[in-house]
Amino acid sequence: MPRYTQYKRTLKYSQEFKLSAVEMSLIEGVKVGAVAKRLDIHPYMLSRWRKEYREGLIVADKRKKITNRRKEAKELTKLQQLEKENAQLKLEVDLLKKWQRFLAEERKKDIDLSKD
């Protein structure tokens, strides 16, 4: 078997190319294998790109990707803050309900004592 003097280079595809390939494969009635064959790429690679597209890793503009991640992080922290605030408000409402019941019982006792 011949010895390789140079390593085979892996092609790097642009985000736009990946995005257009994924969009073509998402057209109804079009098979992944047909798109891959037409673009001269391996079907597994196209399937991987489709997975990355679903996960939001492939976007047309890398700045959008970074912005989306920042936006998601902000939304997550906001959600956590709102959940914490919601739990605090529930505790306060429960405490106020207990206080209201206590006052109602005290009034009832006072009314009963005044009748006697």
Image (cartoon, rainbow, N blue to C red):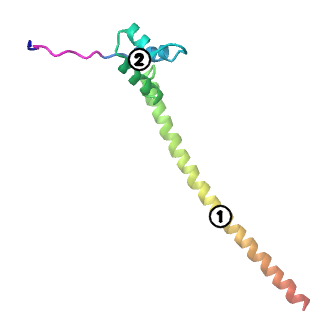
Query: At which x and y percent is residue 102?
Result: 74, 76
- Give the residue type at disc 1: Glu
Where, quadrant-wise, is the N terminus in this rendering? top left
Quadrant for residue 37, please give it.
top left
Q: Is residue 5 left or right of residue 98?
A: left
What residue do we see at 47% from left, 16% from top? Answer: 25
Report the magenta residues as a range. Answer: 4-11
Q: Is residue 113 magenta?
A: no
Q: Which is nearer the N-term, disc 1 or disc 2?
A: 2
Estimate the x, y position of residue 15 in percent, counting from the top left: 40, 18
Q: Give the residue type that dot 2 points to.
A: Lys
Q: CA distance from mark 1 to mark 2?
A: 52 Å
Q: Which residue is mark 2?
A: 18
Query: Mark 1 falls on what kind of element?
Result: helix
Q: Is residue 5 left or right of residue 101?
A: left
Secondary structure mainly formed by the magenta segment:
loop
Residue at figure coordinates x 54%, y 45% from the top left: 78
Q: CB atoms at circles 1 and 2 under 8 Å apart?
A: no
Q: Which mark is residue 92?
A: 1
Residue 114 locus on image (x, y percent): 88, 88
Q: Residues within 10 Å of mark 2 (few under 14, many from 20)?
A: many
Q: Residue furthest front?
A: 1
Drawn side of residue 4 relative to residue 53, left or right: left
Residue at horizontal 45 percent and vertical 19 percent from the top? 60
Residue 35 bears which disc, if any?
none
* Left or right side of 54 for 45: left
- Vertical placement of residue 76 versus 54, above or below: below
Residue 77: horizontal and vertical position, in percent? 50, 45
